[in-house]
Amino acid sequence: MPTGKSQSKSKSWQKTPITNLVRYKPSGFLFARIRINGKLIRRTLNTKTLTVAKLRLSDLERTERGNSDLNAAYTEGKMTFGEAMAMFGERVAKVRDKGLYRDKHGTFEEYCQTELGFSRPYAYNLIGSAEVSEQLSAINEIEIKPVNEAQCRELISVPETKRVEAWKNAIKAAGEKPLTAKVIHQAVAKFKPKPAKKAKVAKKTQRLNVKPGLKLIEAMEKLADSDNTDALMKKLAELRTWLEKAGE
């Protein structure tokens, strides 16, 4: 018998005329609800309009099935990690470079969050890792290849011409121990470009022309011996103005 909590939860969702498309009643937004290879996926389509949601649902389902098939091929040994990584990175890079996200999403970041379920920086890491994996996988002399994204990620910032040497150095540093991302990070650090040092800008000493001030003081000294108080106060005001401007 369904509990009050489950009944309340089920009342929050409303079926639509479109298969695999449900509406979240509290907000009105439409969600994809699809099952791929036994895994239930529920993801917002960021719209309240059925026609728009239907188009996004089709794309989401195609993407998820493609990713699922890719994962299955890798898991079952039909594809190496490098091949799977390169294929996925190529897909994401194509969407980014050709702007294929613009018809439904304002930014690439929005596309990553909505369609792929991760952030834009992570997407860039995947693209970079795919490039690293593809490069190292193509070299026959390297017996030990990268087997996960974390390993490849540590080599993204290493120049392409130095990656093979950096990877070999990481393998050597690990020895009999697991080739973890931490070991790779430390081993390839010397192959990465050093950050440019900020040039120190020497402060120029500005020389102050004191002659106008000295002339005003000289004039005030002469007036001090006379009874011309008004003229003396006028010169004093001029000196104050000059000092204020000089201090700016």
Image: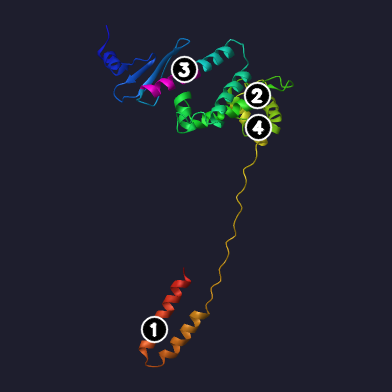
Q: Name the residue under label 3.
A: 61
Q: Quadrant of the N terminus?
A: top left
- Residue 218 place in picture, x, y as percent: 48, 86
Q: Residues within 10 Å of mark 1 (few under 14, many from 20)?
A: few
- Give the Cα separation between the discs numbered 3 and 2: 27 Å
Question: Which amino acid, mark 4?
Answer: Val
Q: How crowded is mark 4: few (under 14 residues within 10 Å), some or many (20 or more)?
A: many
Question: Which amino acid, mark 2?
Answer: Glu
At 43% from the left and 79% from the top, the residue drawn is 239
Q: Residues within 10 Å of mark 3 (few under 14, many from 20)?
A: some
- Residue 152 place in picture, x, y as percent: 61, 26
Q: Mark 2 points at which residue?
A: 134
Q: Sequence order check: which comes first, mark 4 or mark 3?
A: 3
Q: Sequence order check: which comes first, mark 2 or mark 4?
A: 2
- Give the Cα separation between the discs numbered 1 and 2: 82 Å
Q: Residue furthest left?
A: 4
Could you say which quadrant of the image residue 148 lies in? top right
Q: Is residue 230 left or right of residue 167?
A: left
Could you say which quadrant of the image residue 9 lies in? top left
At 53% from the left and 28% from the top, the residue drawn is 123
Q: Sequence order check: which comes first, mark 3 or mark 2?
A: 3
Camera-side mark, 2 or 4: 2
Question: Which amino acid, mark 1?
Answer: Lys
Q: Residue 14 or 136: which is nearer the viewer?
A: 14
Q: Residue 226 or 123: which is nearer the viewer?
A: 123
Q: Name the residue under label 4.
A: 188
